[in-house]
Amino acid sequence: MSERSERTVGHRSDTDLGYFGPQSVTWQVLADPTANIGGMRALFLQALHPHAMAGVHQHSDFRTAFWPRLQRTAQYVTTVAFGTTEQADAAAARVRAIHERVHGVDPVTGAQYAAGDPELLRWVHATEVDSFVDAARRGGTGLDAGQLDAFVAEQVRAAELIGVPDVPRDCAALAAYFDRVRPELRSSPIARTAALRLAVPPMPLWVQLATPARPLWSSLAGLAFALLPAWARRLYGLPGLPTTDLAATVALRTFQTAALRLPENWRKGPTVREALERAASVAA
């Protein structure tokens, strides 16, 4: 029986491999430790769009509940990629419902915005896909250009789930999209505040004193920032040295090597582990 048939017959959750499945490049890219750094890179990049940051600034709890917000964002991406079709559909429905309530006036440009605006949704989608591609390409995953193009194409389905039309379908189209949208980007005070929050998030004093959480997080956030394209770093006023790109690539590969030595249940969350178990049961 085909992978698609296994996940649709009777909607059985134990054989539902979701929208992608073990043969997809999506599973390869997002199960790799480098995806964690890619996700942080995406947040730094997203902050450069004034309308995107206006919505976060005015309608989210990013400033007051940093960790729960970050966890919800990561869980959404993981659920769409590795969850069952029912789980992915439900997660996307929740996001669409939230988007319907988010609108206002951007304090930076003075323009009205709405979270459900296709152009704004396209920006968020593109920053995530581009960041995962960049982390996979530079992090030692071994994926070639054709496979990375396939990942971008697969992510069209993720965009469709929340109603994002006309998104890039390969890496060349992704690069062309950023060339087109760059004139709209800027490092506003709101963007810089959000970037600083991401780099130096709130932590209880005992965590900072009794654990290596603060320097570890700052190191990973610094690596994610260094992976940004040079034009994005320039917008933030931190372009780096000519060797920044090479150093970031080396650091990312070092991170991947170290992370892959950790036990699997440390590297992969419950949603990913459950997906792998379902895939193994289907293959058996």
Image (cartoon, rainbow, N blue to C red):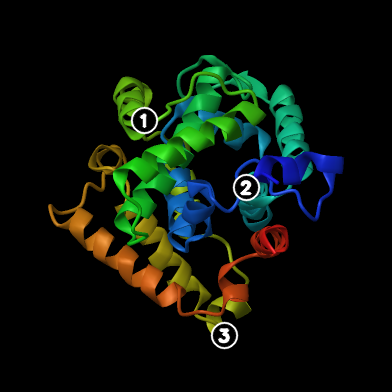
Mark earlier in primary sequence (3, 2): 2
Mark earlier in primary sequence (1, 2): 2
Local packing at callout 2 (Cα closer than 10 Å; few below 14, some 14-19, many 20+) is: few
SS class of the residue under badge 2? helix
Disc assigned to residue 210:
3
Mark earlier in primary sequence (1, 3): 1
Name which residue lies at 49% across and 50% down.
39
Work out whether residue 241 or residue 155 is closer to the camera in this orientation and state it. Answer: 155
Work out whether residue 92 or residue 49 is closer to the camera in this orientation and state it. Answer: 92
* Above or below, comparing residue 110 to residue 210 in the picture: above
* Above or below, comparing residue 86 to residue 168 in the picture: below
Disc assigned to residue 174:
1
| Residue mark closest to the camera, 3 vs 2 | 2
What amino acid is at disc 3? Ala
Local packing at callout 3 (Cα closer than 10 Å; few below 14, some 14-19, many 20+) is: few
Q: Quadrant of residue 173?
A: top left
Look at the image and tell me whether residue 47 can be seen: no
Local packing at callout 1 (Cα closer than 10 Å; few below 14, some 14-19, many 20+) is: some
Extreme residue toward the top, this view = 111
The image position of residue 179, as x and y in percent, is 29, 25
What amino acid is at disc 2? Thr
| Residue mark closest to the camera, 1 vs 3 | 1
Disc assigned to residue 75:
none
State the CA–CA distance, disc 3 to disc 2: 27 Å
Question: Which residue matches tag 2?
Answer: 73
